[in-house]
Amino acid sequence: MVCIPLHDSLLSAAMSTHTSQFHVQGTALGRDIYETVTETKVKSSVLVARAGITIAVIIAVVLGLLLPASIIAVGTAIWFSITAAAFPPCMQWNSFGRKA
């Protein structure tokens, strides 16, 4: 049995998450925004998506260097606050609404 240290699995999870986010951001920048602004359809969207991914990575690095380290804690707190505020009304509506 192979034992993987905990920090390696956490690093792998973080890298996978970042890769997915960069891919989504790059595709959105490259395809959706570019094609909407230029009002053209690109036959080969691979280069446009790659350019979008590159731009997304550059923006992420610049923001990572400019913003304070506490931004992660603040962002997490805001996200959990929004989730906590939105969840109970939805559950109550689904449980006690007209068509429940």
Image (cartoon, grey):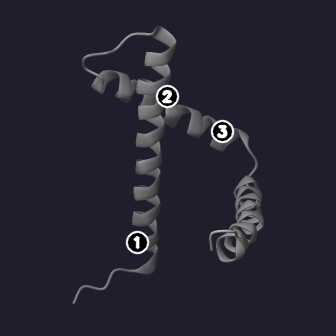
Q: Quadrant of residue 41?
A: top left
Q: Quadrant of residue 65?
A: top right
Q: Are marks 1 and 3 in contact (CB under 8 Å)?
A: no
User: What secondary structure is marked by label 1?
Assistant: helix
CA distance for labels 3 and 2: 12 Å
Q: Classify 52 as above or below 86.
A: above
Identify residue for label 2. 55
Q: Position of residue 44 (x, y in %)?
A: 25, 20
Quadrant of the image containing the C terminus: bottom right
Tell me which amino acid carries mark 3: Leu
Residue visible at 44% across and 79% down in the picture: 6
Q: Classify 43 as above or below 58.
A: above
Q: Nearer the viewer, residue 76 or 1?
A: 76
Left or right: residue 90 compared with residue 56: right
Q: Position of residue 36 (x, y in %)?
A: 48, 17
Q: Classify 42 as above or below 57.
A: above
Tell me which amino acid carries mark 1: Asp
Q: Position of residue 85 (x, y in %)?
A: 78, 65
Identify residue for label 3. 63
Tell me which amino acid carries mark 2: Ile
Disc on res. 8: 1
Quadrant of the image containing the N terminus: bottom left
Disc on res. 38: none
Mark 3 and mark 2 lie on one chain; the one further toward the N terminus is 2
CA distance for labels 2 and 1: 28 Å
Left or right: residue 78 compared with residue 55: right
User: What secondary structure is marked by label 3?
Assistant: helix
Q: Are marks 3 and 2 in contact (CB under 8 Å)?
A: no
Q: Quadrant of residue 86?
A: bottom right
